[in-house]
Amino acid sequence: MVKTFDFQEKLPKLPIPPLAESLKHYARTVGVLQTPEEHAVTQEKIDTFLKNEGAVLQEKLIEYAKDKNSFIEDFWYESYFNYKASVVLNVNPFFVLEDDPTPSRANQLSRATSLIVSSLKFIHALRTETMGPDVWRNTPLCMNQFRMLFATARYPTETNDGVHVANDSKHIVVVCRNQFYWFDVMWEDGTAAITEREIMENLRLIIADANSLSSAETSTSAVGVLTTEHRVVWARLRKVLQEDNAETLAMIDRALFLVCLDHTSPPTASDFAATALHGTYDIKHGHQIGTCMNRWYDKLQIIVCDNGVAGVNFEHSVVDGHTVLRFASDVFTDTVIRFAQSISGTTQSFLTGAYRPPTEDLQISPVKLDWNLNAELKRGIRFAEARLSDLIVQNETRVLEFRTYGKSFIIKHNCSPDAFVQIAFLAAYYLQYGTVVNQYEPAMTKRFLHGRTEAIRSMTPETKAFLELFVSDANILDKMAALRAAVQSHSAIVRRCANGQGVERHLYALQQLHHIVSPGQPEPALFSDDAWQKLGRSIISTSNCGNPSLRLFGFGPVVPEGFGIGYIIKDDGIQFCVASKHRQTQRFLDTLESYLHEIQELLKREEAEKFPHHVKSKSLSVRSGSVHEETGYGFFDDGTPTHHAVKKTPLVGRKLV
């Protein structure tokens, strides 16, 4: 049996690309965002950098990387730990899970209990190293991030942040109406020490205790809201909090994960997303009674609403979406298997756990964490809530659950699904604003030791050419040829990034290394150039995190004038979650939906022109606004369901009507 970390020592290091290659691709990337005059200036700085400082820094980077697991790892951690703004909306992403397949779990108590049980099984598999390693196309992936997924806490200092991992942790923390509770759930080896029934009873007691408090009491003692502050402010307040609450803080920091029990029931998909991203905003009699304070953003959080809707909000500095997705996927799969086992006892388990009864050394009954709060901390909580509320009302989150077509239709028309959707975002922006902008998508580099991500820039010269052609009077075949050229250009970048030949992480490492080898000296002109600054501002920041266990995935915009877009491409649909600072978010989604329908019609018409003998002419007028068409078409069909001749069943017996 292959153990969780068996492939770690065999993984190659992330390569350092040749500098000339990185700069060539960099010039191509920024050129599409510049005027010819601007690009001429940038090209001169690129040439100078390659001949002078860049060549020196490249040699120093190669030397620096010799005793490192990854040449970018430390610099990448620093980019997160030096970030000072609130992590809410700006850093932490979220997942919204699909509903539990067991109907009786469509409520908070049952759903939260189920998710805790499955999560403990996952942790058991991780601690016993019986969880299979991630593999992508027969290539093993780095599992290092899983060492920091649980029992990990981000903490602030006045200079930068850090993380602490408690490998011997055996308890969880539950937050309900801003009140914190804990209880032990396992032995240090990962063996469960609590039953499903005991977990549910603990949650029942916690909810009852939290509900006994007034809104004023719960809002004024909402210490979790401090984790939403500017990191320097939080560092100062945490130091004050530590003085009389050190053990309480340690219980939260060392917890395996948090379970946030929200008292609200989000009615729509957009509400689900907003709840998982930042909680709800609801002011009554001057007090915040929404769920936005019912969090601790420095840790992995499982959020369960009153109606059973569940999600995950995760601290992003040491883990990426792919790692948390494995956790969410395995936990959801375990709930499906347990549902199947309730029907057929012969169904095999997916995550196997172990149970050993607790001794007196374990505290499996819930314990409330009380805070000693002085006047400074009480003021800090009040001001933090006001600033968080400002953040929430300044942002909006909208969801489009597009059901007209998905991966199957896109592949049928010889396009990469991810590239197709990436170009759709740029097309929607172009149709709405008439300009081309910088767009970001992360590429996973976990095939390399301690791999994280690389930057994919979807706005290529080919994509720009397609957008301009798309809004013109050009014929269909030319438009679709341009679309496929754009798709291929995006796919080529993805392949290059996945193979460790990306651009931005390489150049970023050189920039950071300059500050180490030449402290206090001006940066090379390449990094003070407008092109480098522009590339660092992702007007459209996107990420594809598809999996059947997820209903939604998203995050906030990374610049004030931008959009943050999480999306999930399914066989017969695409889920979009878009967040912005009220930049006509719904209009952007409407434009995106309109484009997706229009491009579908163009692809069908292209088929008709290329293969006229395969398509009925009368079927070309399919209504593009129909969002719930049946699927399952032949390769050259235009999209209308095929009606086969049916042999009439003989009438046997007597009709009732």
Image (cartoon, helix red, strand yellow):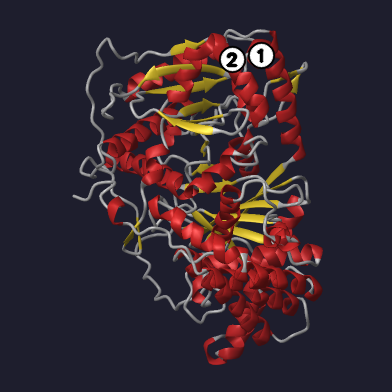
Q: Nearer the viewer, residue 405 or 122?
A: 122
**Of the numbered discs in the image, which one, if any, rests on residue 86?**
none
**Residue 88 figure quarter:** top right
Does residue 426 appear to the left or right of 242 in the view shown?
Answer: right
User: How packed is label 1: few (under 14 Cα within 10 Å), some, or many (20 or more)?
Assistant: some
Describe the element under mark 1 as helix, strand or loop.
helix
Q: Is 228 drawn above or below residue 286 in the view shown?
A: below
Q: Is 186 drawn above or below residue 419 in the view shown?
A: above
Which amino acid, by three-letter code, is at mark 1?
Leu
Find disc 2 in the rendering and name its residue.
Answer: 241
Q: Is 46 drawn above or below residue 303 in the view shown?
A: below
| Residue that extends furthest to the left in the rendered view of this protein | 1
User: How packed is label 2: few (under 14 Cα within 10 Å), some, or many (20 or more)?
Assistant: many
Q: Could you tell me which residue is drawn at 23 percent across and 44 percent down?
A: 348
Q: Could you tell me which residue is drawn at 69 percent across and 77 percent down?
A: 466
Asked whether residue 19 is in view, the answer is yes
Q: Mark 2–mark 1 contact, CB under 8 Å?
A: yes
Query: Where residue 148 sits: x, y (%)?
Result: 41, 38
Find disc 1 in the rendering and name its residue.
Answer: 377
Q: Could you tell me which residue is drawn at 74 percent across and 85 percent down?
A: 474
Does residue 392 appear to the left or right of 61 in the view shown?
Answer: right
Q: Nearer the viewer, residue 366 or 511?
A: 511
Which amino acid, by three-letter code, is at mark 2?
Leu
Does residue 466 appear to the left or right of 349 in the view shown?
Answer: right
